[in-house]
């Protein structure tokens, strides 16, 4: 990480009307801005992605499923509370954000959605440890609501329940969608399969921290929120096959990037700590891995796994914008975002997409 970089280096002015408030009529109706490895920009429709991905490439998707993580209710004293589940830690316990006029202490009882009894067990840094009176996932599915991002102004409805979720979501645990995947439908996935494009999955449960601004000036002072990830053996094997056959590893979304590069970082650190184990270089052979990651990708980061990525347009000063800048370069990032604003692309979770090829000079 360059110690001289500040948050202000990743700022840009976005007209508020370009923040998408609802999904496109169909998943693949979005636009696609293509940035090739030589820095050229091309305005396309999202369906043109099938001309950018080649037979023999591997698409890596994040199969996390967004849970209905937001609940409203009251403390036993009558005060109103808003609960946002951050991470489910067991069948009956979770870590959560709580908004209330007064922070609830240990032993406080909460009544949520007029149906769920919850006890505050204590704190884990900024999060509250909550114990539920039943299986959390079942209760959230029945009484919770989809936690739409703070820049979407409407209350979640049935359309959001469907469209703020990828078609391949299967592992419940995210409180924000891996939004690059929202553009893919079954038809385009089937077309890729017919083309000879392979598919693999990782899981990274996206936390609410993805929307939190960086609150320090110098990037070197920032500490990332932790997210749980898994790179299964089948995906590691698919990456090895793709590499051996000359194909590219294309991550769908920054969360897929973080999962893959977190596994590579853990592997390199393990190799340094245990030189007697002959642990391979992740650039040649990535191994299956899982754990918590706080990986903060900024310019200067050496990507080990990902050759190209599909991603949405990210918030100013966000860690996701920093990740993209590390992939394509600061000047190319600024040029791409300036172009997108001039061409009236739609931004953020329900917005348009980019197909980025890694800058070979980085």
Image: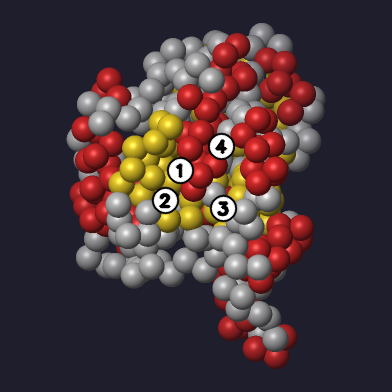
From the viewer's perspective, is 74 left or right of 48?
right
Crowd band around label 3 with a 10 angstrom C-alpha radius: few (<14), some (14–19), many (20+): some
Q: Nearer the viewer, residue 107 or 44?
A: 44
Disc 4: which residue: 181
Disc 2 to disc 4: CB gap under 8 Å: no
Marks 1 and 4: in contact by CB < 8 Å? no
Residue 360 position in % (x across, y down): 38, 67
Alpha carbon distance from label 3 to label 1: 18 Å
Q: Secondary structure at mark 3?
A: loop
Q: Nearer the viewer, mark 2 or mark 1?
A: 2
For the residue carrying disc 4, how many other residues have a C-alpha within 10 Å: few (<14), some (14-19), or many (20+)? many
Q: Earlier in the sequence, mark 2 or mark 1?
A: 1
In three-dimensional space, the C-alpha distance between marks 4 and 1, rounded to whole angstroms, equals 8 Å
**Residue denoted by label 2:** 356
- Quadrant containing the C terminus is bottom left
Residue situated furthest bottom in the rendering: 276
Residue at image location 56% in from the left, 37% down from the top: 181
Residue 23 at what x, y percent from top left?
48, 20
Q: Mark 2 to mark 4: distance in Å? A: 15 Å
Q: Give the residue number, with chain letter if any, for mark 1.
A: 311
Up the image or down, 146 lies above or below 192; here it is above
Sequence-earlier tag: 3 or 1: 3
Disc 2 to disc 1: CB gap under 8 Å: yes
Give the mark nearest the N terminus, 3 or 4: 3
Q: Nearer the viewer, mark 3 or mark 4?
A: 3
The answer to whether residue 267 is seen in the rendering is: no
Question: Disc 1 on helix, strand or loop?
Answer: strand
Disc 3: which residue: 54
Figure quadrant of residue 64: top right
Q: Is residue 13 left or right of residue 92?
A: left
């Amino acid at each position: 990480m360059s110690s001289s970089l500040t948050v202000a280096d990743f700022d840009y002015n976005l007209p508020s009307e370009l923040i998408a408030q609802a999904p496109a009529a169909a998943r693949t109706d979005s636009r696609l801005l293509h940035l090739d490895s030589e820095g050229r920009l091309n305005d396309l429709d999202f369906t043109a992605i099938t001309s950018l991905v080649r037979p023999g490439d591997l698409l890596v998707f994040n199969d996390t499923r967004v849970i209905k993580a937001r609940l409203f209710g009251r403390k036993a004293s009558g005060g109103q509370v808003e609960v946002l589940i951050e991470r489910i830690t067991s069948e009956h316990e979770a870590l959560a954000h709580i908004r209330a006029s007064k922070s609830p202490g240990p032993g406080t009882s909460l009544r949520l959605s007029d149906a769920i009894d919850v006890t505050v067990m204590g704190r884990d840094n900024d999060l509250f440890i909550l114990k539920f009176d039943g299986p959390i996932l079942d209760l959230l599915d029945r009484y919770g609501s989809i936690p739409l991002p703070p820049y979407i102004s409407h209350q979640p409805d049935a359309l959001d329940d469907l469209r703020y979720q990828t078609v391949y979501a299967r592992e419940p645990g995210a409180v924000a969608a891996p939004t690059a995947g929202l553009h893919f439908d079954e038809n385009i996935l089937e077309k890729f399969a017919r083309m000879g494009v392979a598919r693999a999955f990782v899981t990274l449960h996206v936390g609410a921290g993805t929307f939190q601004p960086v609150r320090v000036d110098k990037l070197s002072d920032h500490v990332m929120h932790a997210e749980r990830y898994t790179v299964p053996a089948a995906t590691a094997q698919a990456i090895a096959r793709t590499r051996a056959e000359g194909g590219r590893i294309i991550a769908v979304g920054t969360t897929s990037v973080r999962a893959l590069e977190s596994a590579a970082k853990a592997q390199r650190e393990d190799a340094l700590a245990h030189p007697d184990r002959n642990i391979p270089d992740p650039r040649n052979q990535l191994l299956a891995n899982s754990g918590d990651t706080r990986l903060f990708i900024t310019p200067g980061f050496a990507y080990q796994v990902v050759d190209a990525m599909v991603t949405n347009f990210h918030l100013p000063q966000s860690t996701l914008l920093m990740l993209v800048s590390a992939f394509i370069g600061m000047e190319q990032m600024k040029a791409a975002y300036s172009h997108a604003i001039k061409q009236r692309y739609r931004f953020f979770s329900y917005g348009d997409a980019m197909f980025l090829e890694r800058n070979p000079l980085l």
